Amino acid sequence: MNPFTLPTSSVITLNGPDAAAFAQSQFANDVTTLLPGQWQWSAWLNAKGRVIALLALIKHDENRIDLLLQDNTASTIAEQLRRYVFRCKVAVVVQERLQISGIFQAPDKARQAIIAHTADGRIELDFSNCRQPRTLCIGPPSGAIGSQQDSVNRWYTTDLQSGLPHLSSDAQQNRWTPQQLSLDRLHAFSTKKGCYPGQEVVARTHFLGKTKRELVLLQLSTAVAADTPVFQNGRPIGEIICATGGIPATALAVLTLDRGEAPLFVADAQAQPLPLIPGLER
């Protein structure tokens, strides 16, 4: 198998003595649980507890944290993060020259949350789920890596099947709580760590059990866009938040928990719910 570029992914680096402390104060997961050379899913939330960005947080050491973004342009997120630096000794740097690539095979050395460094200077992450081995690499550009749209689409589909939302639509950012996106499946937020933006909303929702929506994987017989409503018995019960192109299409939707067993419809076509594939939690 040949590696291929992941064109929508990008990396921001937090550099400086306060890099880990800054990440701990801003992101929803507990950075202190990570040892150097490990990574975790995390999220950056607004003050209302809505997800701005879902990211993979890679801890090299206390002075360097890498943020792998799936959808957002790194420059936009970096600019927003810099507003919260204040007196922290940390630089927020967009890594414009790095190449992010994927390949559908198990990593050589990386396993689960443990990263590995390859001989050609790349960082290797294990993006496998229980059914599909995958490796994501971050490193200097290589002429041997091509842009293969079929492979990119397959990678994107595997993300959705694993319950990894892509919030590429502006309307989907700043919209959902971590619980509504079922980010607990990815272990992407903490209810025990100290203060971070949106922490009160996350904790209250968790401890009071007031989550009324959840993430659902759907297979569709027609192409759909994000923001398309999902109907049951003629009434809207949620909406598509991301979907693959092509037919059949794979989509993730946020739906109400109190829905019944009646068929679901999207764009006048019946949608088939499917179980999410476990194994991508870190």
Image (tube, rainbow, N blue to C red):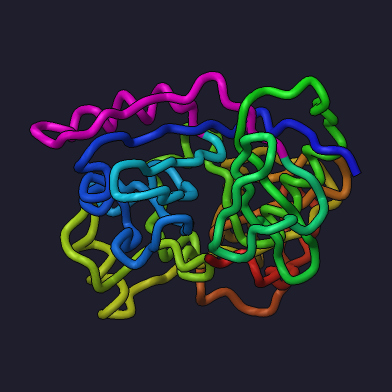
Q: Where residue 139 sits in the image (x, y, percent)?
A: 61, 32
Camera-nearest residue between 11 and 26: 11
Camera-nearest residue between 263 and 142: 142
Residue 55 drawn in magenta: no
Quadrant of residue 228 within the rendered picture? top right
Camera-nearest residue between 19 and 84: 19
Q: Tell me where the magenta segment starts and ends, as one range.
A: 72-101
Q: Where residue 155 sits in the image (x, y, percent)?
A: 75, 46
- In this rendering, position of residue 17 left or right of residue 99: left
Quadrant of residue 205 within the rendered picture? bottom left
Residue 92 drawn in magenta: yes
Q: Residue at x 73, y 42 (%)?
A: 102
Residue ranking furthest to the right: 1
The image shows residue 127, relative to residue 275, as above or below, that is: above
Q: Where residue 92 sits in the image (x, y, percent)?
A: 31, 29
The image shows residue 216, relative to residue 48, as above or below, that is: below
Q: Residue at x 66, y 41 (%)?
A: 137
